[in-house]
Image (cartoon, helix red, strand yellow):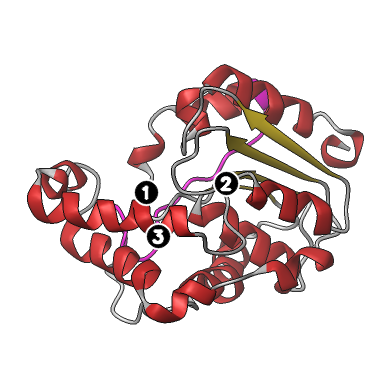
Amino acid sequence: MLHEGLGSVSMWRDFPAQVADATGAEVLVYSRYGYGKSTPCTTHPVGDRYMHREALEVLPELLDTLGIDKPVLLGHSDGGSIALIHAGGAGRPVAGVITLAAHVFNEDVCVASIEQAKTAFETTDLKDKLGRYHDDPESTFWLWNQAWLAPSFRHWNIEEYLHRITCPAMVIQGEDDEYGTQAQVEAITSQVAGEVEGCILPACRHSPHRDQTENVLNFIRGFMERPDISG
């Protein structure tokens, strides 16, 4: 499971356990460098390459270290984008990809929401709230926020990886996602080479696993029961 841009192991709450119970699968959850209680990140590139680094360098190293071959990748937001880059660009076997509110290109609505997050971090108790989940909430926040608000990031786009994804994929997004439009789902489902299903959830924002937990678990359960996944 690959967490969102300000996520961590603890911010998933009990969802990983729910996924394990629903599917019977072993679930691995970790905090990326600079997040949660993981090692601080001193080389995090600001700009449009940080998800590429995670997908093409850090994740392969982690999988090799743990002896994990042909995983199903489940990613939320940035984590979903990392899953797509890895599946399409790492040259490694992937059994399947499930994304929750993933991005494959930047949009004005996303920039506007991240600018609002910047204001909230500077003027409210958001830093203290993030401190419940991250050892260094200030560094964690600014590494994410400055990357997305960098001028070069306006042109960020990972669609080039989609046609190389041959494994099954499921793309889940909330109808009221404040960080992206349904164009993200349309782009992924129209370009992925493998079998792909898009799911738009009503009354749901940027965190489908929190807003529509049972529906998301049902989607994941069905995906994991596919013969080409479970077999």
The part of the chain drawn in magenta is: 22-38
Instruction: Give the overall secondary structure of the magenta segment.
Output: loop
Q: What distance separates the C-alpha of mark 2 from that of mark 3?
A: 12 Å
Q: Is residue 126 left or right of residue 9?
A: left
Q: Amino acid at mark 2?
A: Thr
Which residue is labeled 1 in the image?
7
The local secondary structure at tag 3 comes to: helix
Say if 62 sits above or below 99 in the image.
Answer: below
Left or right, 35 with respect to 54, comes to left
Between discs 2 and 3, the one toward the N terminus: 3
Find residue 81 and report its image quarter. bottom right
The Cα atoms of the two marked residues, 1 and 3, are separated by: 18 Å
Q: Magenta span has 24?
A: yes
- Where in the figure is residue 67, as x and y percent of width and height? 64, 60
| Amino acid type shown at disc 1 | Gly
Q: Does residue 97 show up?
A: no
Q: CA distance from mark 2 to mark 1?
A: 21 Å
Q: Earlier in the sequence, mark 1 or mark 3?
A: 1
Q: Which residue is mark 2?
A: 181
In front: label 2 or label 1? 2
> Which percent across, then down, holds residue 71?
70, 52
**Residue 78 x, y percent position in the rendering:** 49, 56
Residue drawn at x 36%, y 76% as measured from the top left: 150
The residue that disc 3 covers is: 111
Does dot 2 land on a helix, a strand or a loop? loop
